[in-house]
C-alpha cells in the first residue's frame, strides 16, 4: 500500500511529546478505538526495542493480530516502528512518527504508515477500503493524541505486559 500520512499540531514542547510517544504503552491510549487488546512484548515499554502486540478492529479482518516494535528512536525528532500483521504475520508494516517544531512552542507530529502486502488477497483487501479506513483511524488517533497531551482528556487504557 502507498504510505498514508496524517499530522496534527500539539500545543506542547517537542521534548514532552517525544517522551510520551517513546513509551509504547501510551500508544494504546490514543489508538484504542481501532487497535485493541494491547500487550507489551517486554517489561520496559520505553525506547528502542520496546514493542507491543494488539488486535486491529478492521472490517472483514479475519486475521487481526499485529505487532510493532520501535526500531529507531532519535530523541526528540523521530520514532520508527517495524511490525507485521495479517495471516501468518506476512504483511510488513513500517510506521514513522516525525516531530518538528512549530510556531509558538508547539509541535507538529506527522505519522506515516506503510504496509507491504505479500499475497494478492492481501492487496485486494487493502484496495477495497483498507487504505481509506486506515487513514481515517490514524487521523482520529492524532486528534486523540492532541486532546490527551493538551487537555488530559479522552484517555484510553495503557498497555500492560503480556501475562500480567
Image: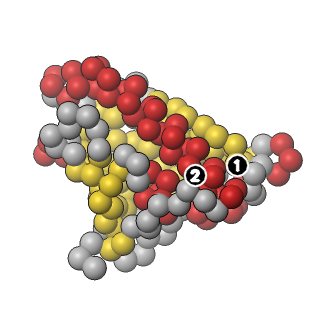
- The image quadrant of residue 58 is top left
Mark 1 lies on residue: 10
- Residue 146 sits above or below residue 130 on the image: below
Q: Residue 158: in sight, yes or no?
A: yes
Q: Secondary structure at mark 1?
A: strand
Q: Is residue 103 left or right of residue 12?
A: right
* Residue drawn where x is 27% and y is 52% of the image: 55
Question: If the image is split into quadrants, where does the N terminus sit?
Answer: top left
Return the x and y of residue 24 as percentages of the image width and height.
Answer: 45, 62
Tell me the distance, in whole angstroms, between the alpha carbons under discs 2 and 1: 8 Å
* Residue drawn where x is 39% and y is 42% of the image: 94
| Residue closer to the observer: 35 or 43 | 35
Q: Earlier in the sequence, mark 2 or mark 1?
A: 1
Q: Is residue 143 left or right of residue 151?
A: left
| Residue closer to the observer: 83 or 54 | 54
Return the x and y of residue 163 as percentages of the image width and height.
Answer: 23, 76
Mark 2 lies on residue: 145
* Residue drawn where x is 83% and y is 43% of the image: 103
Q: Residues within 10 Å of mark 2 (few under 14, many from 20)?
A: many
Labels 2 and 1 touching (C-beta < 8 A): yes
- Residue 140 sits above or below residue 117 on the image: below
| Residue closer to the observer: 16 or 96 | 16
Amino acid at each position: 500500500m502507498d504510505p498514508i500520512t496524517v499530522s496534527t499540531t500539539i500545543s506542547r514542547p517537542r521534548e514532552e511529546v517525544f517522551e510520551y510517544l517513546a513509551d509504547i504503552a501510551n500508544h494504546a491510549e490514543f489508538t484504542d478505538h481501532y487497535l485493541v487488546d494491547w500487550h507489551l512484548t517486554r517489561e520496559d515499554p520505553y525506547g528502542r526495542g520496546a514493542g507491543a502486540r494488539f488486535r486491529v478492529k478492521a472490517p472483514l479482518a479475519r486475521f487481526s493480530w499485529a505487532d510493532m516494535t520501535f526500531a529507531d528512536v532519535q530523541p526528540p525528532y523521530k520514532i520508527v516502528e517495524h511490525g507485521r500483521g495479517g495471516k501468518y504475520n506476512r504483511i510488513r508494516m513500517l510506521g514513522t512518527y516525525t516531530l518538528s517544531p512549530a510556531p509558538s512552542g508547539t509541535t507538529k507530529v506527522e505519522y506515516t504508515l506503510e504496509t507491504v502486502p505479500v499475497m494478492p488477497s492481501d492487496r485486494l483487501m487493502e484496495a477495497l477500503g483498507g487504505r481509506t479506513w486506515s487513514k481515517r483511524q490514524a487521523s482520529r488517533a492524532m486528534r486523540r493524541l492532541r486532546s490527551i497531551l493538551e487537555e488530559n482528556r479522552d484517555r484510553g487504557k495503557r498497555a500492560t505486559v503480556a501475562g500480567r
